[in-house]
Image (cartoon, rainbow, N blue to C red):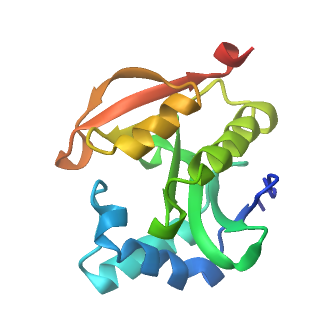
Amino acid sequence: MLPALDTARLLIRERTLADLESCLEMDRDPEVTRHIAGPWSDPVAHRQFVQHRITRQYPPGLGYWSIRERADPDRFIGWVLLIPDHGSGPDVEIGWRLVRSAWGRGIASEAARALVKHAFETVGLPRVIADIAAENRASLHVARKLGMQWLGYDTSDGKRYERYRLVRDDLR
């Protein structure tokens, strides 16, 4: 079980199958997934993909958390993740995805900061990485706000991603 990572505005709790339909609905918005490779156009494959991500076992302290606002705790607004890079590591990836109505309000940065704290202080990771589509200006901005440093490019999934890294010792 993953710990709650709540902030002043947000409830950040372990993602469960109860969040499945909300996750699928968010991903059906082509603006939300336009920078991310995935099975978004195939409903069966999409459901299987998200369900697997929710139910699979991750190393201790890693996984997905759903995000809700304290002001409206029943409304799913997105998720954050801390998972082995490309499914097996050794690096650990940090990521975020929000419904469009939550964009531009600092929610991704706030939730990701809580996740960084958990990664370094609780899990004891030495660093986290993020691969972000080069055109995804909003996510690149979040990475920079977290203090992540640009490392170069990665071409996973046939797309060009910018790779960022945040090292625990850089925060001291």
Image position, residue 171 (x, y; %): 69, 18
Q: Could you say which quadrant of the image residue 47 lies in?
A: bottom left
Give the left or right position of residue 14, taking residue 19 as reference. Answer: right
Single out the residue that lies furthest toward the front: 105
Q: Is residue 100 above or below residue 73?
A: above
Image position, residue 94 (x, y; %): 54, 43
Q: Residue at horizontal 65%, vertical 23%?
A: 126
Q: Is residue 90 visible to the viewer in this orientation of the structure?
A: no
Of 42 and 110, nearer the camera is 110
Report the quarter where the C terminus lies: top right
Image position, residue 80 (x, y; %): 58, 55
Image position, residue 131 (x, y; %): 39, 38
Report the quarter where the N terminus lies: bottom right
Give the left or right position of residue 115, taking residue 41 as reference. Answer: right
Q: Residue at horizontal 52%, vertical 52%?
A: 96
Q: Is residue 16 above or below residue 116?
A: below
Q: Is residue 161 above or below residue 41?
A: above
Q: Residue at horizontal 23%, vertical 49%?
A: 157
Q: Is residue 104 visible to the viewer in this orientation of the structure?
A: yes
Of 140 and 66, nearer the camera is 140
Q: Could you say which quadrant of the image residue 125 lies in?
A: top right
Q: Residue at horizontal 53%, vertical 80%?
A: 22
Give the left or right position of residue 170, taking residue 41 as reference. Answer: right
Q: How many marks?
A: 0
